[in-house]
Structures are given as structure tokens and as C-alpha cells.
């Protein structure tokens, strides 16, 4: 018994010692106190070199945490227990966070780079007057094809996916809104449809697509497409940029009849504490040089007009990732739907996944 | 003195049970009575049992779990049996356990490499001029990978029960004129049944709620209850519905435990005493 107690005391003492030591270590690296910036971002969504540069230039330390879905990030902030200073929700989530009173309004007087952003990415319906958010990246939903199996020009529209020639050939991204969304567009409906019979019709049309669907997967699509596993895929533009970089045979098409246009914007959640660091970072990221460097690393399209001008001509004029104005005019942004409708989208998507060809 | 120290030893286990076993289960059951707006309701259960989707999904899950368990058992029983008679038992056992030290996701990704269009199997088939086959995203690949992952958990309990088998009984059965098949059926199988049951429990229950492999290897062409739970907690944030499915799984688990439980054992012992 005595030995047991002394063993337990020993373990506790060691843990305590390690704890104190690691705290000291963090202090010596300047990770505590007021010069930290707690940044919650999507995985691999900022050039690490920029973090180093920011830390060197301003003396603030960035504490980067990653999340993999808007909903997970929302739950974390709402439940408390986090102390994020900045995060990057998508447009519908900004609306949702605003409704839940989770956002702190921006002080426009402290922002020096707002004028660098293209006017078509400012003052959007999800955040009028950019009261809460600064654009970070934007992108689209589209079709990736492999020119080894599919001839250029064969795939231009969503309806082309239903061609019986592409039996067992398509990989879909595992996202209810996006997949039901393109089915809705192909029916000429809005991607923000809330009416149950229309959604049912879109699901019915998806069921007809089932024989052509090879798999419904997530991030793995990138790897599969780069390895010629499937001729076609439906995914987001940034993921497509990654695939194209790894396989010369791949191309990305945004159907001109319409698709999703999404935004990821920087916002200050109500858990924020380090305002000096926040504004220093927002201004740092709005500098054209830094935004351009970030865009080249991440591969999504930058909303920073001056940064876009700094990108290589081949990137800037790439219609795949910066679609022409006519296509842009047909793109739709997701609105924040009621939990009930979100549930309906997901239930229908689940039924589609269970549908056997 | 001695008695009180003995009681003190139970305290950590008691706390463990309360905080990590009972409390989570109670929370899941509690959560399952709330709808998405936070109102107390039974509607989650009503939705579950009146919707064809969830019923079909349950049937799917049980069926796949059954098939996975069946193939796992088919491979594991002979393996465990012959393992008992090999020379370097401990070494072989170690080799069987070794894969469980590797993370599940890594193993799944390795299988993607083996099964893909340019992967190991198709390159091998290519040597004989056979065109590339679609292996990934089929029922075959899903069941194969799931069974591969579960096999060590089936072999271990069966191996232990074979080890405990009294060699004398097997010899006696042979001496008394039973054929090898009769010995196997009448003596060896009944006496290793406890290992088989433990193995079935260890494999069937996790197989019911597999969800990573359904997406990575099955390409979501195989949908189990695990997929639905993940979706309700992460995407629709309908925790009530997710918990309801969780409760159904817990109930299913109890049914399996009951079916494969020890009650037959007691009856048999009683008979021996007569």
C-alpha cells in the first residue's frame, strides 16, 4: 500500500513538473499573454511562410488551430471553452453566426486594406456593408474531367453527367447541399430551394444519376482523381486546383447555367480578446503581396483585386478558376437555411446514397 | 484495516464506471428525447421507426455486420486452431497482433493503394493481360477490409479457448472410437464455444457502426448507421436524432450480448451435475 501511494505521488510530481516546464517553454517563445493571436482556420488554408513572416514583422505569435467543417467550428465557438480571435466561416455560416450573436462588428477605421478587395466580393447579401467580415478566398463548385477518358467539350453542363456513356465514372463530394444543389440547377431551380416537393424532384433526378456514380467521398477525391481512378468528379475549385497541379490530364469546368459561388471570410468571433493582433493580421493579409502569395499556395481564387494583378498571367486569366462575367452572373450563393430544411437536404442526400442502381 | 483498503481499490473503478460508462449512456438516452429545437419529444423514435430509410439502414448494418463476422470467423477459427499446434506459437501470435498496432486509417489508405485502378492487384492482373477491374467501392472490398481489420480480435479469444482445451478429452474421444470429424464436432467445438462467442461479440458490435471504412473503401455505396450518426452530429446538428440511432445501437448490442451470452453455459453445467 505504501509503495502504491509513493508511486502515485511520484507520477503526480512528474506530471506537475512537466506541466510547469512546458508553460515556461511557451512563455519563453512568447506564446502567452497579449501578443498571441488564436486563429481557427481550415486545414492547409494559409501559407505557413506567411505566418512566419507575420510573426517576424509584428512580433505577435500565431496560435493556429484547424477545423474541418463550418458546423464543427460553430459548435466549438457556441459551446465556449475556446478563445479564438479570428476564424474563417463560409458565407451561410456567417449569416448563422450573426443570428446567434457570435460575431463582433469590425472597426473599419482600423482596417487599412479594405480598398484592395474587388467590389464584386464586398457588400454581399450575407454581410451587407461588410460589417462583420473581410473576404479571404472565394471559389466555385464544378466538374473535373480527365481528358484521357473524356473529350474536351463533352462536359459543359450539369446535364452532361447523366449521359449513359459515363456509367460508373463519377465521383461526388460528400456534401448534401452541393450535390442536391447541382441537381436543382439542372432542373432550373434555385440552389436555396426550401420547398419539399422541388427538393424531392431534385433527389429523384439524382437517383437517375446513381448508375453513373462510382463513389461519394470527401478529401480523398483529390488523390483518386490525380491517380486516374475515375474520369469525372464534382468538387470545389480549390480542390480541383490541387488535382490539376498533380495530373496534367485533368480540367475543371464551371457549368455556365449556374453553380455555387462560395466565400470564406475572416470574422472576429465573440470569444476574441487580442484586438491589436487581430487588426494587425487583417491588415497584413489584405496587403496585395501577401494575399497573392497565399493564393498561390492555397490555390483558391483571391478576392483581393490588387493581389490578383500580381499573380502570374496564366493563373489570372485561367477561366477555370476565374470564370468569365457571364458565368459569374449565373452563380448562386448559399443562404443560411432553417435547421429543418438543412435536415431535409441531408435526409434526401442520405436516401440518395442508399439508392442502389 | 484490510477490508477498508480493499474497498479503496474499488473507488477508481467505481468512478471510471460512473463517468465513462454510465454517464455517457445516460446522456445519450437523455439527448435522444429532444428534437432539433430543444423540445422534449418522442418524435425522434417515431421518425426512426416510421421511416423506411432508417429501417433499411438498420437492416443493411446488421446484414453487413453479420457477413463481416461470418467471414472473420471462417478465417479465424482454423487459424486459432492450427496456431495451437505450431512450434513458435508466441511468435505467430505476435505477428497476428502486430497489425492492430497500426492506425486504422493508415491501413484503410494502404488498401486504397492496393485496390485502386493502378494498384497492386490490378498491376498483377495486368501481367496476365487481364484488364483493370473495379475493386474499390464494391461490397467485396468493403467486407474484405472490414474482416481484415477485425480478424485479430476474433483469433485471440478463440486461441485462448483452444489453449485451455484439455488434450486428454480429445485423446479420450479418439480412443473411444470417434472419427476426427466427430471429435471435432462433439468435443472441440463445444469446448471452444466460449471463445467463439467472445470473438463474435468483439467483432459484430463494432462492425454495426463502422463508418470511416464505408466512405474510404466503400465510397459511401455501403451506408450503415454509423454514417447517419456522423451526419446528424456534424452536419445537420440534430443531436437528438443522432442519439436516437445511438440508443438503437446500444439496444442492438444488448441483444447480441444476450444471444451470445453465458446462459447456455449454466444450463450445461447444471446438466453435468445431475
Image: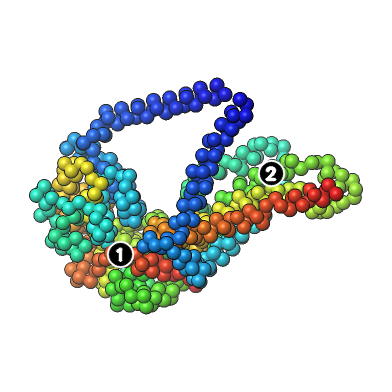
> For this view, does B231 lie left or right of residue A132?
right
> In the figure, residue A240 lies in which quadrant?
bottom left
Q: Is residue A60 left or right of residue B103?
A: left
Instruction: Kindly report the distance in space between the C-alpha atoms of the residues bearing marks 1 and 2.
Output: 53 Å
Task: Report the residue at 30% width, 64% height from top.
Answer: A141
Residue drawn 31% across the image and 61% down it? A236
Q: Looking at this view, is B75 or B200 the one in front?
A: B200
Sort mark 2 into few (<14), some (14-19) or many (20+) by Cα contacts within 10 Å: many
Residue at position x 52%, y 24% in the image: A5
Provide residue B183's location: percent of width, then percent of height.
82, 50
- Where is B260 relative to A208, above or below? above
Q: Nearer the viewer, mark 1 or mark 2?
A: 2
Labels 1 & 2 near each other (Cβ < 8 A)? no
Relative side of B99 to B271, left or right: left
Badge 2 sits on which subunit?
B
Q: Which residue is mark 1?
A: A141
Report the number of numbered marks: 2
Image point 35% across, 77% down: which residue?
A: A198
Residue A272's spot in the image, x, y percent?
23, 45
Closer to the camera in the image, A205 or A47: A205
On screen, residue A63 versus residue A206, left or right, reads left
> Which mark identifies residue B159?
2
B4 up-or-down from A175: above or below: above
Residue A178: mark = none
Q: Position of residue A51 (x, y in %)?
A: 24, 41
Name the quadrant of the N terminus of chain B: top right
Give the chain letter at badge 1.
Answer: A
Residue B18 visible in the picture: yes
Who is closer to the viewer here, B107 or A269? A269
Amino acid at each position: 500500500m505504501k509503495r502504491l501511494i509513493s508511486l502515485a505521488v511520484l507520477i503526480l510530481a512528474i506530471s506537475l513538473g512537466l506541466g510547469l516546464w512546458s508553460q515556461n517553454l511557451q512563455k519563453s517563445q512568447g506564446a502567452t499573454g497579449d501578443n498571441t493571436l488564436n486563429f481557427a482556420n481550415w486545414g492547409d488554408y494559409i501559407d505557413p511562410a506567411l505566418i512566419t513572416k507575420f510573426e517576424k514583422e509584428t512580433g505577435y505569435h500565431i496560435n493556429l488551430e484547424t477545423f474541418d467543417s463550418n458546423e464543427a467550428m460553430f459548435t466549438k465557438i457556441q459551446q465556449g471553452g475556446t478563445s479564438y480571435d479570428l476564424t474563417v466561416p463560409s458565407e451561410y455560416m456567417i449569416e448563422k453566426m450573426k443570428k446567434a450573436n457570435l460575431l463582433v462588428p469590425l472597426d473599419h477605421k482600423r482596417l487599412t486594406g479594405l480598398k484592395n478587395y474587388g467590389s464584386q466580393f464586398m457588400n454581399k447579401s450575407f454581410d451587407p456593408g461588410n460589417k462583420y467580415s473581410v473576404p479571404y478566398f472565394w471559389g466555385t463548385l464544378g466538374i473535373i474531367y480527365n481528358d484521357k477518358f473524356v473529350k474536351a467539350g463533352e462536359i459543359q453542363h450539369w446535364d452532361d453527367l447523366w449521359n449513359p456513356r459515363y456509367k460508373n465514372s463519377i465521383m461526388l463530394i460528400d456534401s448534401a447541399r452541393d450535390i442536391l444543389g447541382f441537381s436543382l440547377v439542372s432542373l432550373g431551380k434555385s440552389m436555396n430551394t426550401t420547398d419539399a416537393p422541388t427538393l424531392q424532384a431534385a433527389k429523384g433526378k439524382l437517383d437517375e444519376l446513381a448508375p453513373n456514380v462510382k463513389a461519394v467521398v470527401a478529401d480523398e477525391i483529390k488523390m483518386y482523381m490525380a491517380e486516374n481512378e475515375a474520369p469525372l468528379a464534382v468538387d470545389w475549385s480549390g480542390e480541383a486546383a490541387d488535382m490539376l497541379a498533380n495530373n496534367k490530364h485533368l480540367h475543371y469546368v464551371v457549368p455556365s447555367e449556374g453553380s455555387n459561388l462560395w466565400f470564406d471570410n475572416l470574422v472576429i468571433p465573440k470569444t476574441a480578446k487580442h484586438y491589436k493582433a487581430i487588426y494587425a493580421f487583417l491588415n497584413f493579409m489584405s496587403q496585395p503581396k501577401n494575399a497573392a502569395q497565399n493564393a498561390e499556395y492555397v490555390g483558391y481564387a483571391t478576392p483581393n483585386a490588387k493581389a490578383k494583378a500580381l499573380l502570374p498571367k496564366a493563373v489570372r486569366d485561367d477561366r477555370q478558376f476565374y470564370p468569365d462575367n457571364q458565368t459569374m452572373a449565373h452563380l448562386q450563393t448559399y443562404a443560411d437555411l432553417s435547421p429543418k430544411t438543412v435536415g431535409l437536404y441531408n435526409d434526401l442526400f442520405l436516401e440518395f446514397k442508399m439508392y442502389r442502381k | 484495516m484490510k477490508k477498508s483498503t480493499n474497498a479503496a481499490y474499488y473507488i477508481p473503478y467505481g468512478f471510471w464506471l460512473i463517468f465513462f460508462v454510465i454517464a455517457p449512456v445516460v446522456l445519450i438516452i437523455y439527448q435522444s428525447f429532444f428534437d432539433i429545437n430543444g423540445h422534449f419529444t418522442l418524435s425522434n423514435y417515431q421518425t426512426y421507426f416510421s421511416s423506411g430509410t432508417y429501417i433499411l439502414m438498420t437492416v443493411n448494418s446488421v446484414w453487413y455486420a453479420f457477413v463481416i463476422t461470418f467471414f472473420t470467423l471462417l478465417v479465424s477459427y482454423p487459424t486459432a486452431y492450427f496456431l495451437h499446434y505450431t512450434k513458435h506459437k508466441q511468435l505467430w501470435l505476435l505477428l497476428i497482433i502486430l497489425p492492430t498496432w497500426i492506425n486504422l486509417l493508415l491501413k484503410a489508405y494502404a488498401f486504397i493503394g492496393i485496390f485502386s485502378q493502378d494498384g497492386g492487384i490490378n498491376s498483377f492482373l495486368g501481367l496476365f493481360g487481364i484488364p483493370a477491374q473495379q475493386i474499390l467501392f464494391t461490397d467485396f472490398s468493403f467486407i474484405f477490409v472490414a474482416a481484415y481489420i477485425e480478424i485479430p480480435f476474433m483469433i485471440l479469444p478463440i486461441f485462448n479457448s483452444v489453449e485451455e482445451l484439455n488434450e486428454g478429452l480429445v485423446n479420450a474421444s479418439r480412443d473411444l472410437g470417434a472419427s476426427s470429424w466427430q471429435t471435432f464436432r462433439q468435443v472441440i467445438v463445444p469446448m471452444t464455444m466460449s471463445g467463439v462467442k467472445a470473438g463474435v461479440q468483439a467483432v459484430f458490435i463494432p462492425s454495426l457502426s463502422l463508418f470511416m471504412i464505408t466512405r474510404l473503401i466503400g465510397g459511401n455505396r455501403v451506408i450503415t448507421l454509423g454514417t447517419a450518426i456522423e451526419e446528424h452530429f456534424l452536419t445537420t446538428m440534430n443531436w437528438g436524432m443522432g442519439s436516437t440511432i445511438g440508443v438503437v445501437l446500444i439496444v442492438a448490442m444488448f441483444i447480441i450480448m444476450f444471444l451470445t451470452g453465458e446462459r447456455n453455459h449454466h444450463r450445461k453445467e447444471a446438466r453435468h451435475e445431475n
